[in-house]
């Protein structure tokens, strides 16, 4: 297997931290307030995020596609939220990060790592 690109390692570590914090926070809220559908949804998203990160970390081809799809969906959700709130808000930062991730996933070195 090819050596994992450094930026994939950095992306995985940072997103794993975000996923773990989101999962822990969601579980804490469920324990504290009950199973609100929004909270359960965020717990599910955090679990999916951790699964995708595992696949990216290990260079599994299908997870390259899933990482790309999740980043695109996140951009769409951020754009929708900004349109609904009639202005740029806190969703711009994750959207910009997702654009950077998509651009990086498309580089030849990363595509070679995932055998794409």
Image: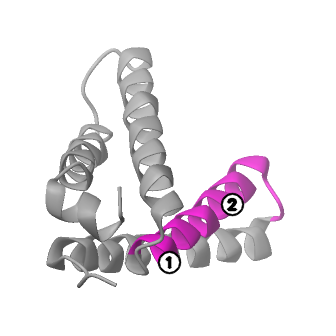
Q: Quadrant of the rendered structure where residue 12 is?
A: bottom left
Count of marks overlaid on the render: 2
Toward the right, the furthest residue is: 34
CB under 8 Å between callouts 2 and 1? no
Q: Is residue 108 left or right of residue 32?
A: left
**Dominant secondary structure of the residues highlighted in magenta in the image:** helix
Name the quadrant of the N terminus.
Answer: bottom left
Q: Is residue 1 shown above or below 34?
A: below
Q: Is residue 59 left or right of residue 111?
A: right
Residue 84 is situated, as x and y percent measured from the top left of the image, at 44, 17
Tell me residue 41's x, y (percent): 70, 52
Check the picture and name the quadrant holding the C terminus: bottom left
Q: Which numbered circle lies on residue 94?
A: none
The residue depicted at 27 percent of the width and 58 percent of the height is: 111
SS of the residue at dot 1?
helix
Q: Nearer the viewer, residue 44 or 25?
A: 44
Q: Quadrant of residue 96?
A: top left
Residue 35 colored in magenta in the image: yes
Residue beneath label 2, please? 44
Above-or-below relation of 39 to 38: below
Residue position for label 1? 54
Residue count near mark 2 (Cα–Cα under 10 Å), binned few <14, some 14–19, many ≥20:
some
The residue at 53%/64% (across/down) is 49
Front disc: 2 or 1: 1
Is residue 5 rendered to the left or right of residue 1? left
Q: Quadrant of residue 108?
A: bottom left
Query: Is residue 63 shown in magenta?
Result: no
Q: Which residues are magenta?
A: 34-56
């Amino acid at each position: 297997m090819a050596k994992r690109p450094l930026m994939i390692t950095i992306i995985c570590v940072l997103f794993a931290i975000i996923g773990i914090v989101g999962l822990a926070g969601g579980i804490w809220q469920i324990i504290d307030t009950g199973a609100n559908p929004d909270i359960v949804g965020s717990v599910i998203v955090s679990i999916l995020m951790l699964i995708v990160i595992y696949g990216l970390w290990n260079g599994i081809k299908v997870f390259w596609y899933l990482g790309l799809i999740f980043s695109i969906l996140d951009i769409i959700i951020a754009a929708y939220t900004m349109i609904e709130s009639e202005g740029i808000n806190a969703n711009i930062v994750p959207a910009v990060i997702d654009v950077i991730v998509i651009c990086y996933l498309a580089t030849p070195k990363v595509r070679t790592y995932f055998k794409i």
